[in-house]
Amino acid sequence: MTLPVGCAAPPGGLDLDTLPDAVAARATVVQGTVTAYGEPLARAYVRLVDPDGEFVAEMPTGPDGGFRFFAAPGPWELRVLAPGRPVRSHPVELELGARETLSLAV
């Protein structure tokens, strides 16, 4: 899969296994899979939005529909953008050191 010009995020996000143990132990992570009709959706983008509605980050889903963000603890919103589908919003509350795993349907 080729990334659009200017997009630096790897599809699906960084692999947790590549992080040093000390970093991984403290990381607050929200990750998951985007699906459509029960199947992984590889051609989507997931946006991380702060409590004020401000854009923070965006990444393309991987071939398995996967995504991963490292974020500060607190309330966040995930917005899924997929071709031909309305934008879907999913609120999430993250705790320090948590690994929140979600399945987001569009």
Image (spheres, grey):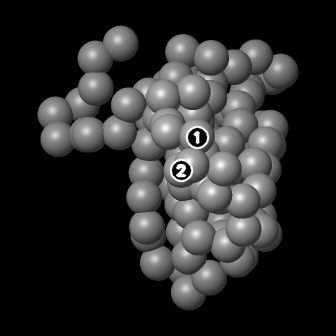
Mark 2 and mark 1 in contact (Cβ < 8 Å)?
Answer: yes
The single residue placed furthest to the bottom in the displayed view is 52
Give the residue displayed 35% in from the left and 12% down from the top.
Answer: 1
Report the amino acid beneath label 1: Asp
Residue 90 at x, y percent in the picture:
74, 59
Image coordinates for residue 41, horizontal then vertical, percent = 62, 23
Residue denoted by label 1: 21
Q: Is residue 26 above or below residue 12?
A: below
In this rendering, is residue 57 above or below 40?
below
Question: In the image, what residue occupies the spot 72% across and 68% down?
Answer: 96
Q: Percent x, y for residue 77? A: 66, 66
Mark 1–mark 2 distance (CA, rounded to whole Å): 5 Å
Q: Is residue 82 in view from this perspective?
A: no
Counting from the top left corner in percent of width and height, residue 53 is at 54, 79
The C terminus sits in image quarter: top right
Going by the numbered disc 2, the residue's amino acid type is Val
> Which of 81 and 95 lies nearest the eye of the viewer?
95
Is residue 25 in view? yes
Q: Quadrant of residue 2?
A: top left
Element at label 2: helix
- Pointer 2: what residue? 23
Tag 1 secondary structure = helix
Q: Give the residue drawn at x 75%, y 49%.
A: 99
Residue 2: numbered disc: none
Left of 9 or right of it: where is 4?
A: left
Q: How many residues crowd mark 1 within 10 Å: few (<14), some (14–19), many (20+)?
A: few
Question: Is disc 2 surrounded by few (<14), some (14 to 19) or many (20+) residues within 10 Å?
Answer: few
Residue at (44, 69) in percent of width and height: 55
Question: Which residue is outermost to the front?
Answer: 22
Frontmost residue, 80 versus 98: 98
